[in-house]
Each structure stands twice: as structure tokens, then as C-alpha cells.
Amino acid sequence: MTLRSAAWYSGDVRNAYIHRAWMRRGLPDDAFGRPQIAIANTASDLVPCNRHLSEVAAAVRDGVHAAGGTPLELPVFGLGETQVRPTAMLWRNLAAMQMEEAFRANPVDGLVLLGGCDKTIPSLLMAAASVDLPAVVVPGGPMLTGTFRGVPLGCGTDVFRLSEEVRAGTLSAEEFARSESAMIRSRGHCNTMGTASTMALVAEALGTVVPGVAGTPAADSRLLEAAHGSGRLAVEMVAADRRPSTFLTAGSFANAIVALAAIGGSTNAVVHLLAVAGRLGIDLTLDDFDRIGSGVPVLVDLLPAGRFLMEDLHRAGGLLAVLGQVRDLLDPTALTVTGRPLVDALDDAPIWDPEVIRPRGEPLVEHGGIAVLRGNLAPDGAVVKPAAASPHLMRHRGRAVVFDSIEDFSARVDDPDLDVDADSVLVLRGCGPKGYPGMPEVSNMPLPRKLLEQGVRDMVRVCDGRMSGTAYGTVVLHVAPEAAAGGPLARVRTGDVVSLDVAARRIDVEVPDDELAARAPSEATVAGFAAPRRGWERLYVDHVLQADTGADLDFLVGSSGSAVSRESH
């Protein structure tokens, strides 16, 4: 087998000399004839959920060495969901592009991909799919459970819950501030079934993580053991030429969708899986999530849909125990990074705590998978997460209260004179990929203060943006086309009646189609749309696709492979 890196290092010509000499730095001669494994590390002090990944990278390095490879740590673009503005999603595609170009341009034969916070695993998968080098993902793992006043805290979910209690006047600002240091107890990403946990588990169901690893807490020493094993596996994958295109199939994505439903995962996974499939040339559509996943029961009793946290899921048996309950729904031919079918890992996957992982016959939610809605308000689709919604609002009809931008919403939502009641439907627009830009997590709008004070804790909300995976509520999101792309959401007016019928898969505004089409968006709506003049934001707004196809850039869809045709000197 000829290694890809041999194109840099083999021979006695001047360029080979340059490549070897500048990399030697104490390496023995035979280091250049071994598989060169890049450890793509998204660690950064500004990505708090990923800060520990350099320790994980050291364990991967040892595993690569043990298997006869040469490990090479490669820092790549890390995105911290909690830190960057206006939204980490604005740079997911840039991170994927930077990673892909770095993987292709360098003398590497295989990849170990270290990710944690929400956008890092999606961008790593998108890049690996496009460059098509042997690659295995090591998720950084969730943080340990923190407690406050003797009660476990779910990071993200309890931020939303407690902040609403402050606004409702049932929790003091001092007590709220006191919970802050208790919530983030250890290294790792969110310990709820937010986007980070969801994408780690879904990546395993997809086949890109060694079965049984995803969900291992960040502080658990077994994560370092798994990282060591993944480093060894990367060398094996190079020898077997086991690239993403050789084992990721439509069946792999079907398994990921089943897993997404069974764990009660984040709606953000829909956008990310569509984007990864687009890089592989796999025909995955929004409707596939409804067709494959909507009838799958939610088996994991985890916040935000349930009670427990990721540390509990791990001790209860983890993802494999969950998938064991829905094995009949999985594609038995879909392979993993190990070269073996995913279902082979389910032969010995018992449930150790049936309170956390429900048996198939006793689900948390009977039909809890992502529901895809269409109608004159979302011609190209929208999504809702039934497991996080209020049952009494799954069929609802109410008067729209429209906000033209997030700034408009923030300025008016707590106005005591706002004409809103518990039956109203809150509509927020200008928050899609083009409009914000970047499709932020603002769809789970805080409820008006005066309604919170009346005891209201959920309302139907409609938006062209996203919702945090840690959030909850009856929220219709990812509305496509978005308002800034000419979608009908831009033409809804306060007072229009909006009807939601999740069972019928409908979201409509009760306005005749010809009247709706004839309306012009308000000046305030248009004024709120992003209009960048230069840089990445300009490139993004000019080329980003809509949520129903994954919100990738139009010129990044597909694969360029790993070949580099020209020398550097």
C-alpha cells in the first residue's frame, strides 16, 4: 500500500528533502514511512466545552504511536456556542471549509476528529466527508451533573427555566446568580440532550464513532482509554483504506435518524445531518426525518424532554442500550469506522436503569421523533420537536403577534400594553440563514412577562431561526423559505390567525394565498435583514442555502477528495 503522505516524503528530490527536513525535529527516519495521522483538535480557551480536548489529543497520540503511526496534532477552527456572536452557526461552514482545506493540503493519511461543542462535530464531519480521508470521531463528552439547593441542574435547560422564574417573580436575581457556579461542575459540554450531546450520539449511530464511546463523560478516565483506542483504529483505517465514502450510506443516515428520535435529540441535528449528507452526495431530504423518525418512541428520559442528565444515560447503558430497543428499525448493513455493522455492537447492550432508558414497551413519548410541517407558512418545510412540546398545544389556533427582528422582540415582549394572551402565536422573523445572518438559537422566545406572572409557561412560537437543543416548548422552527429569502413568513401580520396541527403536519396562516402573495413585507422587516458589505458574512449571505437542505454554502456541497495536484516549491 502506498501512503498518501509518500507524495510529500518519498524520494531524494529537493521537495522531498524540504518536506522531511522541516518536519524532522528529532523524528527518526522511519517516521516518514508510517501512516501520518492528523489529530484535528478544536480545543480553545474560548470554547469552554472543548478546553480539555488537548488532554484527549495526548491519549490519541499514544494510541497512534502504539499502532505504528506518526501522530500530528492539528489545531482547527473551534466554535463555542456560548461565546461567539451573532451565532456559532454563522461559522459552521467556514470551520468545515478551513478543516477540509487543512486536511487536504497537508501530508496526512488519516484523521482523528476531536469535537465537543455544538458546531464542532458537524463541521468536522462535513470536512471529513468532503476530503474523504479515513477518519474517526472522538466526542469530548458531557460535563458531570451539578446541583443547586440539592437538585440536579441541567445546563442550558435550567438556564432557560430559572431565568423565566426570575422574570415571573418567583425566583430572586440573587438566587439565580448563586446557581451560576453550580451549573458548570466540570470539563465537558452540556449535560442535557442539547445539540452537543445529540451530535455526539448521532455521530456514533451514523457510524463515525467507535460504538459505545459517545456519551462518555468528559471527566471519566474511560474517555482517555477510548481516545487511545481511536488513535490505534485510525492507523488500521488507513491500512484498510476505510474512508467515509466506503461506509457511510443512506442506511447510515437512516440509523442516525432513528437514534435522533429515540434519544429525544435536538432539532439542530436535522440541519447538520442534511449538510453532511450533501457533502457525501447522499440524497437525504427533510421528509426523510419524518418518514423514518416520527414514529420512533422516545426512550431516553433526559432533559429537556425528561428528567435525567447525560451522566445518568451513560451509567444506564448509553446509546447502545437505547439502540438495542429499536434494533428492528435499524439498517443492519450500515457499517461503522470499525468496518463492522453497527447492529453487531448491540448483541450485549442491556439497560441498567429502566428509569433513564425506557424499555420499548414503556416509552417516554410514543411518537416523539422530529415532525416536519408544511403549509402556506412554510412551503419548503418547518420542524417541531413533539417530545419538548406541550401536548395541549400540538393542535392550536391563535392570533399572530409578529416581531420583525430579535431587537423588536426584545424591545416589546415585556411591554405591559402588548396585545397578547395565552392563545396568541408569537411569530419572529428575520432569523434565518440569510436574514440574521447565520440562523441563531432565538426561536424559543421568552414568554411575555405579564403572561408568566399569570402562570403561563408555554405558547406556540414560530420562527425561521433555530432553537437550542437544551430548550423546550411548542416551537415551530427552521421555517423555509425564511423571511429574508422571500418566504411567506415575511408577509404575516399581527392579527392574522395561525393554525398548527402537528398530527396533520400543517402550519398555516388563515389568509387567502393570493392575498398573502400580494402583501409586501413591512419596511421594519426588510430593515432588519443582514446586509454585510465585506468578509465572510458577505460571502455567507450571498451563498448560503436554506434550512431544508442543511444551510451549507452552495459551492461547498459535494466533495473534492484528497488529491493535491501541484508541488509547493
Image (cartoon, helix red, strand yellow):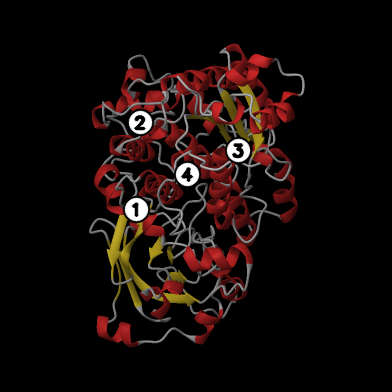
Q: Which mark is residue 391?
A: 1
Q: Which mark is residue 189?
A: 3
Q: Residue furthest front?
A: 13
Closer to us: 485 or 459: 485
Judged left or right of residue 475, residue 172 is right
Residue hosting label 4: 126
Q: Which mark is residue 299?
A: none
Question: Which type of secondary structure does the marked residue at label 2 adopt?
Answer: helix
Marked residue nearer the N-terminal end (4 or 1): 4
Marked residue nearer the N-terminal end (1 or 2): 2
Disc 4: CA contacts within 10 A as few (<14), some (14-19) or many (>=20): many
Residue hosting label 2: 246
Q: CA distance from mark 4 to mark 3?
A: 20 Å
Question: Which type of secondary structure does the marked residue at label 3 adopt?
Answer: loop
Query: Which image quadrant is residue 486 in?
Result: bottom left
Question: Which type of secondary structure does the marked residue at label 4 adopt?
Answer: helix
Q: Position of residue 150 (x, y in %)?
A: 65, 34
Instruction: Judge depth for marks 4 and 3 and give the one in front.
Output: 4
Depicted 529 relative to depicted 129: above or below: below
